[in-house]
Image: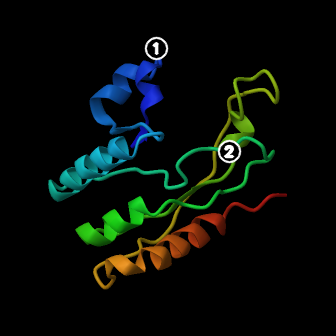
């Protein structure tokens, strides 16, 4: 899932339109449709990659993990699929902006794949609990030096 604006990107647009689920973050109807499609994909055995923070806030340098939105976790509980938290630690240092303010450079990102968090024992009303557990797991590797 990703922001609908990526469909217009000349480089990523073709890739994005063929395999991603576009979400217009300004529209609740668009979000509903995207999560409906995501649920259908999960029911058909597909995996999903969702960034639950719903965007990147660029007022902090280095960036900080922002609170997650609930949709991802409600969907995981509803479909009884595990959540696999992944921490991408230093990608921001390589590609913070368009290169004009802090610069962009090639490099190696550190990625941590955490243990899956299973949802079979959870009810929809526990989405905040799951959201907090995933947030804390991901944020545990985002240590600033």
Residue 64 can be seen, yes or no: yes
How busy is the neighbourhood of tag 1: few (under 14 within 10 Å), some, or many (20 plus)? Answer: few
Residue placed furthest toward the right: 145
Rendered location of residue 74, percent (x, y): 36, 67
Residue 105 horizontal side relative to residue 138, left or right = right
Is 118 above or below relative to 99?
below
> Which residue is more in the foreground, 103 or 4?
4
Which residue occupies 82% across, 30% down?
A: 102
Residue carrying label 1: 10
Which residue occupies 31% across, 85% down?
A: 121
How busy is the neighbourhood of tag 2: few (under 14 within 10 Å), some, or many (20 plus)? Answer: few
Rendered location of residue 34, percent (x, y): 31, 45
Rendered location of residue 36, percent (x, y): 24, 51
Count of marks, rendered view: 2
Residue 111 horizontal side relative to residue 52, left or right = right
Which residue occupies 57% across, 71% down?
A: 137
Residue carrying label 2: 57
């Amino acid at each position: 899932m990703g922001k609908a604006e990526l469909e217009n990107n000349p480089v990523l647009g073709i890739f994005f339109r063929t395999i991603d689920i576009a979400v217009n973050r300004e529209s609740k109807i668009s979000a509903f449709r995207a999560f409906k499609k995501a649920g259908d994909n999960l029911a058909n055995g597909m995996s999903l990659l969702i960034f639950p923070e719903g965007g990147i806030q660029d007022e902090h340098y280095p960036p900080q993990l922002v609170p997650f939105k609930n949709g991802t976790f409600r969907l995981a509980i509803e479909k009884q699929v595990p959540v696999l938290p992944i921490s991408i630690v230093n990608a921001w240092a390589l590609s913070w902006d368009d290169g004009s303010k802090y610069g962009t450079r090639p490099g190696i990102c550190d990625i941590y794949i955490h243990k899956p968090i299973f949802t079979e024992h959870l009810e929809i009303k526990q989405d905040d609990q799951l959201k907090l557990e995933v947030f804390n797991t991901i944020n545990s590797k985002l240590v600033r030096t």
